[in-house]
Image: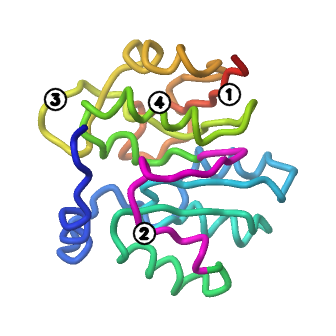
Amino acid sequence: MVKLDSDYWTSRYEKGQTGWDLGSVSTPIKEYIDQLDDKSIKILIPGAGNAYEAEYLWNSGFKNIYVVDLSQNPLDNLKSRVPGIPNAQLIKGDFFDLADQFDLILEQTFFCALNPQLRKSYVNKMNLLLVPGGKLVGLLFNFPLTENGPPFGGSKEEYLSLFESKFKIDTMETAYNSIKPRMGNELFIKTVKSKV
């Protein structure tokens, strides 16, 4: 397996090389969160970066939120903005080492930051981390996959072939409400863990 490198990501934060950082929750994920009624669900945001999604969730009354990132910097940034979030819910570590289960996992620029060789492992791990009927929801980049990255792109066809073995695909369509610089380049996905 290709090793995930915490030093690489920490260096990017320290140098301000965070072009993926929107400075706020992305519109498609915000609008999805706004439709959620059950504020007790257990939510994971992997490779969360500065985790504006977690901040938005917390401020919207969701308290059972877990954030994992390889770098301590973004976790500290989140804690400074949301001091009430318990330290135990801010996990510095490798997503692939997690051993827990969640009702919902939000995907926001984590998948595209991983070496494409890890994509099958990502799908398998997501399946393990979700309770039966749990959901993986978020955004995947929809532009040609190149060797240059992160971010690494991909196509709807590739993603369908990856996810269909472990998930029921409810939605995988071009996001209609992306921010302007990403318009047309994001697929909104809503998948449900197969009960099989």
Q: How far apart are marks 3 and 1 (CA)?
A: 28 Å
Task: Determine which of the numbered discs, if any, sits on residue 52 in the image.
Answer: none
What are the residue bounds of the magenta stretch? 87-105
Left or right: where does residue 157 sit relative to residue 18? right
Q: Sequence order check: which comes first, mark 3 or mark 4?
A: 4
Please name whichever residue, 19 or 168, is drawn nearer the observer in this view of the structure: 168
Residue type, label 4? Val
Give the vertical position of 159 relative to 95 (above or below): above
**What number is the disc on residue 92?**
2
Q: Where is residue 66 in the image (x, y as percent from the top left)?
A: 60, 62
Q: Which of marks 1 and 4 is in front?
A: 4
Q: Which residue is drawn at 39% across and 56% down?
A: 94
Q: Pointer 3: what residue? A: 146
- Mark 1 lies on residue: 192
- Secondary structure at badge 4 equals helix
* Distance Cα–Cα, label 2 vs label 4: 21 Å
> To which quarter of the image does residue 23 belong?
bottom left
Identify which amino acid the numbered label 1 is placed on. Val
- Please report whichever mark, 3 or 1, sits nearer to the chain's N-terminal start: 3
Of badges 3 and 1, nearer the viewer stands: 1
Q: Which mark sits nearer the N-terminus, 1 or 4? A: 4
Compared across the picture, whether 38 is left or right of 15 comes to right
Disc 4 designates what residue? 123
- Name which residue type carries label 2: Lys
Q: How far apart are marks 1 and 4 (CA)?
A: 12 Å
Q: Which of marks 3 and 2 is nearer the N terminus?
A: 2
Q: Quadrant of the N terminus?
A: top left
